[in-house]
Image: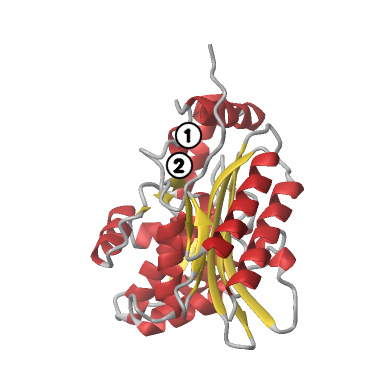
Amino acid sequence: MTVETTYAPAHAASDSILRDVADGIAREWDALGVRGSFLARNIDTGEQLGFDVEVPVPLASVVKVPLALVVLDRIAAGELDAARPVTFVPSPGGAGPTGLAAFRHPATLAVGDLLLMMLSVSDNAAADLLLDLVPVPEVAARLRSWDCPGLRVRHRLHHMYACAAGASGNDFSLALELAVRDERTGHHTIETLDPAHASTGTAGALVSLLERVWRDEIADPRATAELRRLMGLQVFAHRMVSELRADSLRFSGKTGTFLHLRHEIGVVEADSGDRVALAALTRADRRASQAPDIDLAIGVAARRAFEALRG
């Protein structure tokens, strides 16, 4: 017999007022059929609000942010040339719908432009070409050396799609159904949705990474500056930034979407000087490839958190 349990996330907040904001966000997500982790932190004051901030979650394309930082640090150290040409040759079963992953003909790009494609349009093929140059074990080792214990990079981007295709016989509607079912049971048919095998992160670890990037406290400052610039060029505006549109605000972020996963991390900066780092990691309890209500809920959460944390 299945026993229904009440959703009771663990809150992390600097005071009771911020806890109430976090609790409201968690309740709204629960009403939508969403389980997730959320954290927002004022980079300069340290005040924060969130819930389930230490729960490891498969990152999907959010993993491209730590990957980019490692590649940019190699470039800053003179170990990799941003102008180095890399040729992409399409193959059957491409990983994703954007950028090089959607190309039908060979193309040659510089390493620096692969970074741009990876972060601006979430190009999975560009990410895997960068992982040819800076392999997964090196990325993982660099994150350990930077003391990022809540981040785990374990596989290439194409591996996400290969595992889903293998489990579902190339039927991604079935893969989505499996993902939702397995989220409830905790037994994952698709390996790259299992936190024990996936590239994972916690909301706490991701916000700490963003905080260190924005404060130039990790990697070479030239690398962190370029990462900030590239994250500011993301073209997707349907999640966090949807509720943060104003001439006085700037948002730099990275989405992550795969099957029932809908994530975004980023930093919102105001002309007033306020800087808030955010991470929203969600798993939907529904078999829908499109969920604009969940995307909007992430945007609303980001706006409420920013308003609560700004000076």
Disc 1, disc 2: CB below 8 Å?
yes
User: Where is mark 2, residue-wise?
Assistant: 159
Q: Position of residue 264 (x, y in %)?
A: 58, 58
Q: Amino acid at mark 2?
A: His
Q: Is residue 39 visible?
A: no
Circle 2 packing at 10 Å, graded few (<14), some (14-19), many (20+), is some
As drawn, 103 above or below 247: above
Q: Nearer the viewer, residue 188 or 91?
A: 188
Identify the residue at the far front of this view.
16
**Left or right of 221 in this view: 244:** right
Q: Residue at x 54, y 61 (%)?
A: 16
Tell me the quarter of the image containing the C terminus: bottom right
Q: Nearer the viewer, residue 252 or 184?
A: 184
Q: Nearer the viewer, residue 135 or 42?
A: 42
Q: Residue at x 74, y 73 (%)?
A: 245
SS class of the residue under badge 1?
helix
User: Where is mark 1, residue-wise?
Assistant: 163
Distance from disc 1 to disc 2, alpha carbons, whole Å, reads 6 Å
Q: Is residue 38 visible?
A: yes
Q: Position of residue 23 (x, y in %)?
A: 59, 52
Corner quadrant of residue 181: top right
Q: Amino acid at mark 1?
A: Cys
**Left or right of 71 in this view: 166:** right
SS class of the residue under badge 2?
helix
